[in-house]
Amino acid sequence: MSVWTTRADELVSFGDLVALSVLDRSDAVGRIVAAHDEGLIQCVLVRGNSVRPGELVEVEEHQLLLRVFR
């Protein structure tokens, strides 16, 4: 199982909801759904002012800001 650390020093993994630092989507919240061999983490966006829910984005570990609880 893959585990990553957010900038807030929280451990997150598949299925976790996280705030993301993504260009032009500074308010993005997404769910971690997959990992790639290149070290990228795939997230499906779920909410935010400039977010289309369901859109997939790939981020690096340093772009995971903090874990979000509903």
Image (spheres, rainbow, N blue to C red):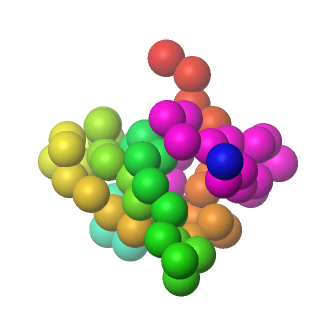
Compared across the picture, whether 69 is left or right of 50 comes to right
Compared across the picture, whether 24 is left or right of 42 comes to left
Q: Residue at x 43, y 41 (%)?
A: 31
Q: Residue at x 42, y 47 (%)?
A: 33
Q: Position of residue 15 (x, y in %)?
A: 49, 35
Compared across the picture, whether 64 is left or right of 45 comes to right
Q: Position of residue 38 (x, y in %)?
A: 53, 82
Query: Residue 25 lies in what quarter of the image?
Result: bottom left
* Residue 54 magenta-highlighted: no
Foreground residue, 5 or 28?
5
Vertical order, 38 against 18 (above or below): below
Q: Position of residue 51 (x, y in %)?
A: 23, 49
Residue 8 in sight in this render: no
Q: Which region shows up in magenta? A: 2-21
Q: Residue at x 78, y 42 (%)?
A: 10
* Residue 8 magenta-highlighted: yes
Q: Residue at x 57, y 22 (%)?
A: 69
Foreground residue, 61 or 48?
61
Count of numbered marks = 0
